[in-house]
């Protein structure tokens, strides 16, 4: 990642450059989960406008330019890689992990950051609202404004990540084994094949002010859910204006949201929507 892009990202996140520290890491997390949504719109559009799946993955440069220009984010594999790349550029040390959720294996990415000889879980996709210290010898806990987190060692290199209040207390199982970049890039590429995650559902999650908002196209009728310590709220969205409403709330392009919704609704259960979608704009030339 070039310095020019890193500076543009920090400007977008409203985080002036600072030496690596735990406090600054939490500031970056806090801003990222408010600026960069967890969303499948961008990957659905990319998949259905790209013939060769090997050309689908949005590498960190493309990911961040899409975020800065159009408000896009991504799902866990691409988002974690993009945030990890930024952290490494800023001087942090750490590695990527690929983790389990319930009975699903190797389905969720997260980052481990090494700071002052300790390990911290960083996950801007679920999202986990702060860097959470974990230890193989004991249970660790962390309270944030949104949720309380517990990381519980269960076996060698494996930890249950729990959250409350939440109807599904277990978030995922952290597999604390570094995944090298060549292997990780292959995982990202494979996630665009027919067995990839969230290519057939439009999902959008973003922290806005003091709530986490979520839209999931599989839930009918369409609704916007919001979550806070006070509980859960739902607002039903008219189908005729759902893309317009989501664009306003999530600050993403209405036409891309409409295209992604159209692709998953018109041909459910297929991986081929032809070329009716318009491709994502190319990132600006960093030169």
Image (cartoon, grey):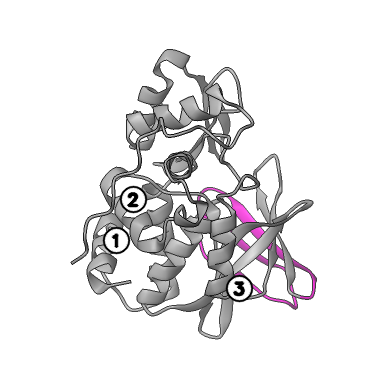
Could you tell me which secondary element the residue under label 3 belongs to?
Answer: loop
Q: Earlier in the sequence, mark 2 or mark 1?
A: 1
What quarter of the picture does the C terminus occupy? bottom left
Which residues are drawn in magenta? 128-156
Assess whether mark 1 and mark 2 are in contact (beta carbons under 8 angstroms). Answer: yes
Q: Please name whichever residue, 284 or 79, is drawn nearer the observer in this view of the structure.
A: 284
Could you tell me which secondary element the residue under label 2 belongs to?
Answer: helix
Could you tell me which secondary element the residue under label 1 belongs to?
Answer: helix
Circle number at residue 179: 3
Q: How many marks?
A: 3
Q: Is residue 49 above or below residue 156?
A: above
Q: Can you give x and y, in whole percent of width and height, for residue 258 in the image?
A: 40, 27
**Residue occupied by mark 1:** 9
Label 2 neighbourhood size at 10 Å, few (<14), some (14-19), many (20+)?
Answer: many
**Residue occupied by mark 2:** 67
Q: Residue at x 42, y 56 (%)?
A: 58
39 drawn magenta: no
Q: CA distance from mark 3 to mark 2?
A: 25 Å
**Residue sitting farthest toward the bottom:** 117
Q: Is residue 253 above or below residue 236?
A: below
Q: Earlier in the sequence, mark 3 or mark 2?
A: 2
Q: Is residue 57 left or right of residue 186?
A: left
Q: Can you give x and y, in whole percent of width and height, for residue 143 in the image?
A: 57, 57
């Amino acid at each position: 990642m070039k310095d020019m892009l890193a500076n543009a990202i920090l400007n977008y996140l409203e985080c002036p450059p600072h030496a690596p520290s735990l406090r600054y890491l939490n500031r970056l997390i806090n801003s990222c989960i408010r600026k960069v949504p967890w969303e499948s719109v961008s990957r659905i559009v990319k998949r259905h406008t790209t013939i060769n799946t090997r050309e689908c993955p949005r590498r960190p440069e493309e990911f961040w330019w899409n975020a800065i220009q159009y408000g896009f984010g991504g799902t866990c594999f691409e988002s974690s890689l993009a945030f990890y790349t930024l952290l490494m550029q800023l001087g942090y040390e750490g590695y990527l992990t690929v983790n389990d959720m319930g009975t699903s294996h190797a389905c969720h990415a997260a980052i481990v950051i090494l700071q002052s000889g300790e390990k911290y879980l960083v996950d801007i996709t679920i999202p986990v609202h702060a860097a959470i210290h974990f230890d193989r010898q004991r249970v660790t806990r962390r309270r944030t404004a949104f949720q309380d987190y517990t990381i519980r060692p269960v076996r060698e290199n494996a930890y249950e990540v729990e959250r409350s209040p939440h109807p599904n207390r277990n978030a995922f199982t952290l597999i604390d084994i570094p995944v090298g970049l060549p292997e990780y890039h292959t995982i990202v590429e494979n996630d665009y094949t027919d067995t990839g995650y969230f290519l057939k559902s439009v999902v959008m999650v973003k922290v806005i002010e003091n709530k986490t908002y979520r839209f999931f196209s599989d839930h009918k009728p369409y609704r916007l859910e919001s979550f806070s310590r006070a509980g859960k709220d739902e607002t039903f969205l008219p189908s005729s204006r759902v893309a317009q409403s989501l664009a306003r709330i999530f600050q993403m392009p209405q036409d891309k949201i409409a295209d992604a919704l159209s692709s998953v609704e018109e041909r459910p259960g297929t991986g081929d929507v032809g070329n009716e979608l318009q491709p994502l704009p190319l990132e600006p030339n960093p030169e």
